[in-house]
Amino acid sequence: LSGSSSSSMESANLLQDSFSRLHENFPTFGMDLRRETGGSPDVPVFDSLIRRTMEPHLRKARLMREKVRNRTNLEVHAAIAGSVGVPYVRLRQERPFLYDIHTHPLHEVLAETLGVRDLSKLHELVGLGEAMAPLLTRTGRRPFQEAYDAFVTSFCIPLLHSMAMSQNLFHGASSRISYRYQAFPKIRILKPGDASDGPHCGTSNGHSIGFLHFHVPLTAAMGTNALYTESHPGKENWHPLITKSVGLGFLFDGARCLHFNMENTTSDTSVALEFTVAIYGDRTEDEYVDGESLCTRSILEDHFSLSGHGFYDEAVIDLSPQSPSWQVVAKKHGGDLLDPDYRVGFPFL
C-alpha cells in the first residue's frame, strides 16, 4: 500500500482543496432554485428554465466528479456510468427499503437524546447547537450511537450481504467478507429556510467509489425538504427521495450520482441519517476491478481512511460453513463504539 497510499493521500489533499472551492457556491444554489420556483414547497418540475438555472452549479459538480475519476491509474474513456474501476455495479441501483421502527426506533432514540418530542419541529428550539449538545458527550450520545450501530450491523449489512449473495458476487472471494462503514452517521438537518448542499457526489467529497450510500429519513421528507438525486450517474433525472413517515430508507449510488438539497420552503424540518458502506474481501493483491468485483484495497482507501483513524468502523461475515458465525455479522474490533470523528460534520466540527 505504500505507493498507492502516497498517491491516494496526494489525491485526497487535492480533493479537499477542490471540494472547499466547490462549496463556496452552494449557498446560491438554493436561492437560485427558489427564485425559479417562486418559493413553492412542492416538488418542482425540472423544466428547461430550472435546468438552465441549475447548469452553472451542475457544471462544477460534473467537473469535480470527473477530476476524481481521472485521479486513478485507470484509462478512463467510457462514460461516467461505465463499470470500469467500479465494484459491484448491480448493487448500485437506487432502491427503497423498509425497516422495523420497533426494532430500530432511530427517530425516537434521537428525539429522546435531544430532549424533543418531534424532530420535525427542531427549528422551533432557541438554538440548534444547544439542542445537539447531548451528542457531544459519550454518555449523552451512547443510546443513539448504539441504536445506529445496531441498525447498520443487524440490518443494513445483512441487507447488502443478501443482495450480493443473490448476485453471486462472492464467487471466488475469500471466506471472510468485510464491511467498512461510517462509525457515526452524518445527521442531515434541513430547517425551513435552509439550503444545505448543492449538487455533489460522494467521490468528490473524498469517499471511495466503493461506497454505497444509505439515506434514512427520521422525519417525513416531502417536497423541498427531501434529498434530490439522479437514478444513474449522468442521467440527471432529478427526483426526491420521499417518505411520508419513518421506516423507509434508500440505498443509492451516492458515490457517483449527483445529489442535492433545495432550499427548504416547507414549514417542517427534515432530519435524516446518511452513511456509507463498502464491501471487500481479505485478498491483499490488487486486481482488475469491474462491475462484478468487490473492492480492492487501493479502491477502498480514501480521504477519510488515509487522513486519520476514526471515521470508519468494520464488521465481517465468515462464509465458511464450519464457522459458528456464518452469516452473522461480527465487529472486527469488538463492541466498542468509536468517538464521532469531526469529519462527520455538525455538531462535531
Image: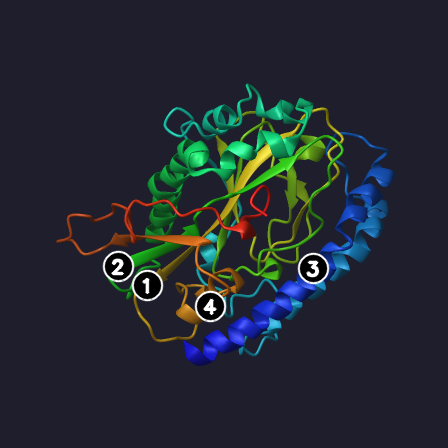
Q: Is residue 294 left or right of residue 330?
A: right
On residue 176, the disc is 2
Determine whether label 2 and label 1 are within 8 Å by CB. yes
Residue for badge 4: 299
Q: Nearer the viewer, residue 325 or 290?
A: 325
The kind of secondary structure element at disc 3 is helix
The CA distance from mark 1 to mark 4 is 12 Å
On residue 281, the disc is 1
Q: What residue type is labelled 3?
A: Ser
Q: In this view, does 204 lie to the left or right of 9?
A: right
Residue 79 seen by the camera: no
Determine whether label 3 and label 4 are within 8 Å by CB. no
Q: Which amino acid does label 1 sit on?
A: Gly
Circle 4 residues within 10 Å: few <14, some 14–19, many ≥20: many
The CA distance from mark 3 to mark 4 is 23 Å
Residue for badge 3: 20
